[in-house]
Amino acid sequence: MDFQYLFDITKYIAFGAGVTVLVFIVTLVFSVPFGIFCALGKLSRFRILHGLLGIYTWVFRGTPLLLQLFFTYYGLPMITNGAVKFSPLMAAFVTFIINYAAYFTEIFRAGIQSIGKGQYEAAKALGMRPRLTMQRIILPQAVKLILPPMGNEAINLIKDTALCSVITVTEMLRNANRVMSRDFNVGALVIAACLYLLLTFVVIQVFRKLEKHFAYYQIK
Amino acid sequence: MMDKEFMEILRTHNLHKSFGKLHVLKGVNLSVEKGQILSVIGPSGSGKSTLLRLLNHLETADRGSIFIGGEAIAREDENGNSVYLPAKEVLKICSRLGMVFQNFNLFPHKSVIENLMEAPIMVKGLPKEEVEQKCMQLLKKVGLTEKFDVYPGQLSGGQQQRVAIARALAMDPEIMLFDEPTSALDPELIGEVLETIKTLAAENTTMIIVTHEMTFAREISDRVLFMDDGQILVDGEPDEIFKDPDHQRIRTFLQKILEKR
């Protein structure tokens, strides 16, 4: 085994891992707040908003992420005659944010809805307005409830970033694939697999810490 | 002697409330004077809790009016239907009422002292140090000073309910409403909560207490309301109701309660 070669391809694949992490972080940073707003929208009294958000989560959870990536990268320029055209990385950001926000919307909605009526009533009886109640009483408790499903989604997101390779984003899997087809070497895939495991391990640890942090109280 | 008009702190006129087809309140007229302790008793489903929940706008009335300290949160239009003030104003007026729930409803993610301090700071905007000092005194009053930094989940039901009473008091309410405050408690924990309520009674706090604790109601109240089928059947002094009730409904009710014991 040539260690210099091994080092070189690992470096090359790890460079792709940087893009993987970038897509991961950008997606979370934007889709979490977006998901919170959509969840609040789904819980509001506006019927039309409910309907629109219902269609949104249905479409984006109900079709393959791969298809959505194709659509954003290849489809949009076609139907807009080139007016809307994203770079590969930008197309990945946009698609992942919208797709993941759809999942987060449903997770947050469920989390908020599992906080009992009594909490709202207690807050109201103390003179707290609905907005304050949401900020200070409901959302902080919902965070605890949504952590486990959020952890799952975060792990999925790490792995889903591999899909970006099909729209020519030079992330980890794409680089590994290139090495493999150039050198007929399956080792590249093993290296990529190890790096994915490392990333998901970190994510798991972070969520374990977060869950521990919120273990100081129970929600009935 | 102040005239009655001045002393009145709460009044309802012809309150009606239905949940779907179920007509729960059928015209309740009520007037409460400052310093009065009022117990509301009656069979389950008679509308006691609903009445309490209408007073601080946890439910909205269909018909009738509600006045708190002379201010109407709901008035009657020409057909007798309830017309409410805008939600913000109702909330403000209703903050003159403190509420204690059957299931405590403490905020589980906040420590005991944070539960008490939340509303005075976030709603009234009072300075933290001042609020903290006052809330510690309230905890002393309910006998839970040493529990100030634990979370509600670590407390017994009785302790939780005492915290809930202190939390309501932290907003300086003019009237305290108790919605079956001991019904969710194990029998051995009921006493400590009733004792706490008695302490408040001794300080002339105006209170409306929905309860199934007959001995307690008789002992503490200036006035007892017996509700049945959405109406106030009898409104009188405790002895009138408990000693020798001339109403057959009350006799049957009291007998049933006693048999349960």
Image (spheres, coloured by chain):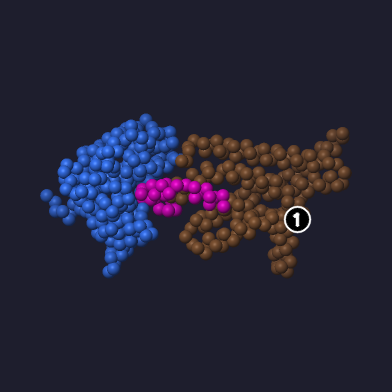
Asked whether residue A117 is drawn in magenta, I would say yes
Q: Residue furthest left?
A: B1
Question: On the picture, is A38 further left or further right than A138?
Answer: right
Q: Position of residue B25 (x, y in %)?
A: 30, 56
Instruction: Determine the residue positioned at 36% across, 48% down.
Output: A126
Q: Which chain is brown?
A: A
Chain hosting mark 1: A
Palette colour of chain B: blue
Q: Is residue B173 visible?
A: no
Along the viewing direction, whichever of A103 and B169 lies nearer the viewer: A103
Question: On the picture, is B78 further left or further right than A89?
Answer: left
Instruction: Determine the image quadrant of residue B116.
Output: top left
Which quadrant of the figure contains the C terminus of chain B? Answer: top left
Question: On the picture, is A126 further left or further right than A96?
Answer: left
Q: Position of residue B24 (x, y in %)?
A: 32, 55
Q: Amino acid at mark 1?
A: Ile
Dot 1, how many residues are within 10 Å of its Cα: few (below 14), some (14-19), or many (20+)?
A: some
Instruction: Determine the residue positioned at 72% across, 63% down.
Output: A75
Magenta residues?
A106-132
Tell me the residue that label 1 is attached to: A167
Instruction: Determine the image quadrant of residue A155.
Output: top right
Q: Is residue B76 visible?
A: yes
